[in-house]
Image (cartoon, grey):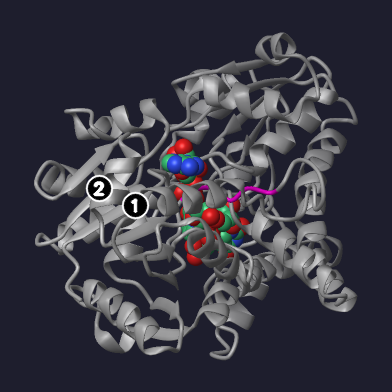
């Protein structure tokens, strides 16, 4: 089967960039990305591609090249489903906030809605691709809905999880470590797998395209995120021990990372990992293990989350303790609010939790982030429901200039590793602050010796 028309349901951080790259690399395929969210689609269609809703280095150029040629963004979900041979489901799968599995299981209501809509519209055989991260065996549920409510047409369900990281989405998509495609081992299943392999082989070498059964593919995605997050919690656990013993976590990370069996990547100690997926996917894994009665497996992975929560709390506690056990009415400036550099995404960012803790201690928080808006920061805090929106508005001040944000502050806390923070005139910042001037570097991006030479009381993580 030659694919000429693709539809993707969900124009978010995954659907948007993934489809933009498929469209760029496959000019012979018409790619339509649909979403229920009208504002989001309007932003994807903004004539100025700098205004697309997701900030990712290199993305606006790709959208500018392909949009209107073979890349389209639309709210007309039904039409796009009807026309496509392949439908990617790339909707959100957040942690459930109600009912059975509340706070742990993935909420699959958006996935089910997509399956029901596809079943209703489809009049010809289609390949349905799980792009969202899903619990193992979700394909079974999707198949059951499609087969029992559809118009008698044949569906093949493939699992094709996405491994891109935000901030590097475009390079990850253009040059992936691997593409994973899981499908049925029947002849029809293999045909569907091959059709998707053909799409990716327009730019990815064939030996990097891995095919497996559906369940292995679904579970590999959760496993990959669990392993990645586990490395961060492992090094963060060591950071606390380093602080007690005089060891330096950067030196420890370097020393162990040179062992080729361990590897050097993903060993940066920090204020704690954030992002929309690590926590949600591990909680989901824990829930799945528990539901099979595997309590040791569940407890093992849950510890990764417990350690991460501890690391965030430890950072805010350290600020309070160092500032003579009170931050009441003190100005604490946050540099960074995004969960990592080079993205405007703030989901589960450590900054939100640290700010919440410090506001509970009656601190006055000032924030500068090069890509995150004030309204986003306030809605992140409101979402925690710790206090009223009006209180959050009164206690958090947002600046569009870092020097102004730091002026007169008692302490600066670095929450995101934006490159520009390293290039600031820190002497100028020091001169404008209250004394002693404290810097809490939650990302270990500044040089301790240089900061101390300026006069700062500097504390990084794990040294
Ligand atoms: P997102 O919230 O940015 O985007 C999801 C979009 O789906 C939203 O715009 C929403 O309006 C839309 N949507 C929901 N239900 C819909 C429906 N029935 N019809 C049409 N549109 C609908 O989410 P995301 O970050 O792109 O994540 C999507 C999935 O990909 C999740 O399962 C996530 O775990 C996974 N994932 C995310 C990343 C990442 O870096 N963000 C990386 C790999 C995998
Ligand atoms: C992560 C994975 O890296 C992707 O492979 C996966 O596709 C994605 O989750 C997903 O499923 O959503 P992402 O969350 O976008 O990607 O970004 P990461 O680079 O993994 O960073 C996650 C968090 O860990 C950030 O807060 C980051 O600052 C933190 N981190 C990362 C560390 O604290 N130390 C490190 O060494 C690396």
Q: Which mark is residue 32?
A: 2
Residue at (31%, 56%) from the top-left corner? 123
Residue at (49%, 54%) from the top-left corner? 115
**Nearer to the camera, 222 or 250:** 222
**Nearer to the camera, 214 or 345:** 214
SS state under label 1:
strand
Is residue 246 something that shows in the picture?
Answer: no
**Nearer to the camera, 164 or 307:** 164
Q: Where is residue 386 in the image (x, y as percent from the top left)?
A: 81, 25
Residue at (16%, 63%) from the top-left corner? 4
Residue at (84%, 40%) from the top-left corner? 317
SS state under label 2:
strand
Quarter of the view holding residue 303:
bottom right
Is residue 170 something that shows in the picture?
Answer: yes
**Nearer to the camera, 415 or 75:** 75
Residues under labels 1 and 2: Cα distance?
6 Å
Q: Where is residue 83 in the image (x, y as percent from the top left)?
A: 23, 52
Quarter of the view holding residue 55:
top left
- Asked whether 334 falls inside the magenta stretch, the response is no
Q: Position of residue 221 (x, y in %)?
A: 55, 71
- The total number of labels drawn is 2
Q: In which quarter of the image is the C terminus?
A: bottom right
What residue did someone put label 1 on?
Answer: 8
SS assignment for the magenta stretch, majority:
loop
Q: Do the residues labelled 1 and 2 touch (CB within 8 Å)?
A: yes
């Amino acid at each position: 089967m030659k694919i000429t028309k693709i539809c993707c349901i969900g124009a978010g951080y995954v659907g948007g960039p993934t489809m933009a790259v498929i469209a760029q690399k496959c000019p012979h395929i018409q790619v339509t990305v649909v979403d229920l969210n009208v504002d989001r689609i309007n932003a994807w269609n903004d004539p100025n591609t700098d205004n697309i809703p997701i900030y990712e280095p290199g993305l606006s150029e790709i959208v500018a090249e392909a949009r209107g040629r073979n890349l389209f963004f639309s709210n007309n979900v039904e039409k796009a489903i009807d026309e496509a041979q392949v439908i990617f489901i790339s909707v959100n799968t957040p942690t459930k906030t109600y009912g059975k599995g509340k706070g742990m299981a993935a909420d699959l209501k958006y996935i089910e809605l997509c399956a029901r809509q596809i079943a209703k519209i489809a009049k010809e055989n289609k390949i349905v691709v799980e792009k969202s991260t899903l619990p193992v065996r979700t394909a079974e549920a999707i198949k059951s809905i499609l087969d029992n409510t559809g118009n008698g047409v044949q569906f093949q369900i493939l699992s094709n999880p996405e491994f891109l990281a935000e901030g590097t989405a475009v390079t990850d998509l253009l040059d992936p470590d691997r593409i994973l495609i899981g499908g049925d081992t029947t002849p029809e299943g293999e045909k569907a797998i091959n059709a998707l392999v053909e799409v990716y082989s327009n730019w990815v070498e064939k030996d990097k395209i891995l095919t497996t059964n559906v369940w292995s593919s679904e579970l590999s995605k959760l496993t990959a995120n669990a392993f990645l997050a586990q490395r961060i919690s492992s090094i963060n656990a060591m950071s606390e021990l380093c602080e007690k013993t005089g060891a330096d976590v950067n030196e420890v990370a370097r020393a162990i990372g040179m062992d080729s069996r361990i590897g050097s990547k993903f060993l940066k100690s920090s204020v704690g990992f954030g992002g929309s997926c690590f926590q949600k996917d591990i909680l989901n894994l824990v829930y799945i293990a528990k539901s099979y009665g595997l309590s040791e497996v569940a407890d093992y992975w849950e510890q990764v989350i417990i350690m991460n929560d501890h690391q965030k709390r430890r950072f805010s506690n350290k600020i309070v303790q160092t500032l003579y056990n009170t931050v009441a009415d003190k100005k604490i400036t946050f540099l960074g609010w995004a969960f990592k550099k080079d993205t405007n995404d703030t989901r589960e960012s450590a900054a939100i939790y640290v700010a919440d803790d410090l506001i509970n201690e009656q601190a006055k928080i000032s924030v500068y982030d090069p890509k995150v808006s004030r309204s986003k920061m306030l809605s992140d805090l409101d979402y925690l429901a710790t206090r009223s929106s009006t209180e959050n508005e009164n206690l958090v001040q947002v600046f569009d200039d870092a020097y102004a944000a730091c002026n007169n502050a008692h302490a600066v806390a670095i929450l995101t590793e934006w490159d520009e923070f390293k290039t600031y005139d820190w002497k100028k910042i020091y001169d404008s602050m209250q004394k002693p001037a404290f810097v809490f570097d939650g990302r270990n991006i500044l040089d301790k010796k240089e900061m101390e030479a300026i006069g700062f009381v500097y504390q990084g993580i794990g040294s």
